[in-house]
Amino acid sequence: MHDAQTQPTVYHKNSLGGSDIKVEVRDVSVSYGEKQALFNVSLDIPDKSVTAFIGPSGCGKSTFLRCMNRMNDTIDGARVSGSLKIDGAEVNDRAVDPVVLRASVGMVFQKPNPFPKSIYDNVAYGPRIHGLASGRDELDAIVEQSLRKAGLWAEVSDRLQDPGTGLSGGQQQRLVIARAIAVNPEVILMDEPCSALDPIATAKIEDLIDELRENYCIIIVTHSMQQAARVSQMTAFFHMGSLIEVGPTEEIFTNPLESRTQDYITGRFG
Amino acid sequence: MALSKHAHIVTAYGEELDKLADELARMGGLVEMQLVAAVDAVVRRDASVVPDVRKREAQVNAMQVDIERRVIRLFALRQPLATDLRMTISALRIASDLERVGDLAKNIAYRSKDLNTFAPLAVLDRVERLGEIVAKQLHEVLDALSSFDVEPAIRVWRNDDEVDEHYNSLIREMLLSMADNPALVGPGAHILFVAKNLERVGDHATNVAEAIHYMVTAEALDPSDQPPR
Ligand SMILES: Nc1ncnc2c1ncn2[C@@H]1O[C@H](COP(=O)(O)OP(=O)(O)O)[C@@H](O)[C@H]1O
Ligand SMILES: [Mg+2]
């Protein structure tokens, strides 16, 4: 067994059991068939705040993100154990409808994935399915509001019927964020949302994340230390399927307590 | 020596950090030489070292500029984090303190020329003692710097008391003699100046100790433990 799987997580002061917790994770493990990908992760994720997940490729960041909205359900042979509560409600409860859950836990991926539909319909899709709007006017309002919140309205308001796939990469990513926002999510998951974007488009997304933080619990996976440092308040470091260390971002980047965290963020061989 | 026992994946980055530490150590060595030469010039009444001191002063200044340039470059191009961040920012602080020590040492050495035009004073023994204590403080803090060792840094920081005690009693004695014998006012003023500069060197040594403490532990030294100044 790797020692990463036997050593307990290092929690910085006040990073476990604080107030205003949105997501409470206890002893979550995930296996794909015979292969265990995540080992007993326990973590509190604060509301109205950005939490960054960092760690080398394959350490389980995406696997862990997928636990939040039960996306692992869709993977054959994936087994999830442990407890994951959002606002105190167990996500893995049989009574929870994954479709409803995925509206309240929105997800943004590395590669922008707008539907092959108009800009308008991309945003209106969710509210329509979930019956959030009664009538065209209300739907229009939701679409406009969501595009505004995603910082895209000014750029697309005069061409809402154009295909979403015709936008630039950065605009597409903001469209996907607008689509997620349109269904009133509680939590927004972002899996390397900027890795396909240029620095300016990245800066716009980061600015947007900073604004969205006032209203949502945001979790972002990123391979850029600088991005984690810029956008997040909390940082969690994963290594070989274990949560190694978690704490305030400033502390993680100035004074990590674990040598593996230190080696990773400074770019050293562990 | 380094704060981390592991090597950087990007070799050139690791080398830049190592080079920064080396430059800082070299600058420390040079400044220490300056201080010892300056105290010697006053105590041995020998101003012949002044040209050497002047030459090294230019070197010290150039090294500070070089270290600053390296730090700016590291921030701009490497964005150092964690121990690397603390090391880089501390290098900047320490280089600035060392540069000040170099200045003070140079000033002391220059004073020796004027002092030597007067008859030797009995208080020179005390100047020598203060010079020894301050030089020891500087030496130990530079040792702590090259070993990344926090214990000797804390010792230096606490020991600033001793510097102040010697400084105060030297000043008192000098002022009393000057009151007794107005002929001593001329050389006495130089001695007061030399003593004040030595005391300031001691303060810079404690600043360096604080920077080392932060670099190694990520924490400031507890100000409640601060020796009175
Ligand atoms: N669908 C899957 N089927 C089997 N193994 C998977 C699957 N997804 C991820 N894994 C494995 O789980 C581990 C964690 O992967 P992942 O969560 O994608 O890591 P990260 O997002 O940190 O790069 C890896 O070893 C990966 O190969
Ligand atoms: Mg991933």
Image: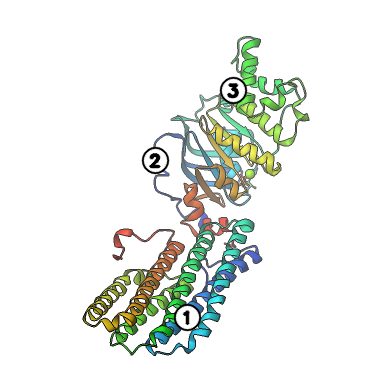
Query: Is label 3 in a helix, a strand or a loop?
Result: loop
- Residue A229's disc number: none
State the separation of the CA atoms marked 3 and 2.
29 Å
Query: The C terminus of chain B lies in which quarter of the figure?
Result: bottom left
User: What residue is shown with label 3?
Assistant: A183
Callout 2 amino acid: Gly
Q: Are marks 3 and 2 on the same chain?
A: yes
Q: Residue furthest front?
A: B182
Q: What residue appears at the point 38 percent right and 79 percent down from the top-left corner?
A: B136
Residue B211 vertical placement versus A39 (above, below): below
Callout 1 amino acid: Gln
Callout 3 amino acid: Val
Horizontally, residue A229 falls left or right of residue A125, namely left
User: What residue is shown with label 1?
Assistant: B34
Residue B168, x across and y down, in percent:
27, 73
User: What residue is shown with label 2?
Assistant: A17
State the separation of the CA atoms marked 1 and 3.
71 Å
Q: Residues within 10 Å of mark 3 (few under 14, many from 20)?
A: many
Q: Quadrant of residue B149?
A: bottom left
